[in-house]
Image (spheres, rainbow, N blue to C red):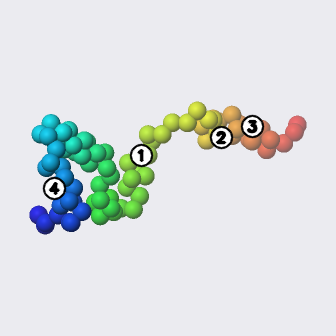
Amino acid sequence: MSSPSPMVRQILDQAMQLPVEDRRQLAEELLAELEHERPPAAASTAKGPYSDWLDAAGSVHSDFRDISTDKYPHVAAAAEDDQPET
């Protein structure tokens, strides 16, 4: 592992001045934040440019109805319009 940047080194030096319980709390909060962050771009692009979208496919819900949601009545109405009058 490479040495930390000067800014990280400064933060670490300041954190070491904190009481032990505060350092533990700081470490827990930093780890919790890291768990919620997205993976690096290189890891995401290794699966392909649309992998995030594909992972989310089928997981979205909408309360709005459109033609594709209720297509059969629309198709039936269109088919009736094409019928010649007798």
Residue 29 seen: yes
Work out how far the residue at label 4 is from the one at label 2, CA to CA, in angstroms.
Answer: 61 Å
Residue to which mark 3 is pinned: 77
**Which three-letter amino acid code belongs to the residue tagged 2?**
Ile
Q: Earlier in the sequence, mark 1 or mark 2?
A: 1
Q: Who is closer to the viewer here, 14 or 49? A: 14
Residue to which mark 4 is pinned: 13
Work out how far the residue at label 2 is from the one at label 3, CA to CA, in angstroms.
Answer: 12 Å
Residue to which mark 2 is pinned: 67
Q: Who's the residue at 15% across and 48% down the image?
A: 17
Q: Earlier in the sequence, mark 4 or mark 1?
A: 4
Q: Earlier in the sequence, mark 4 or mark 2?
A: 4
Left or right of 54, for residue 81: right
| Mark 4 or 1: the one toward you | 4
Residue 16 image position (x, y, % from top left): 13, 49
| Mark 2 or 3: the one toward you | 2
Residue to which mark 1 is pinned: 56
**Which three-letter amino acid code belongs to the residue tagged 1?**
Ala
Residue 54 image position (x, y, % from top left): 41, 51
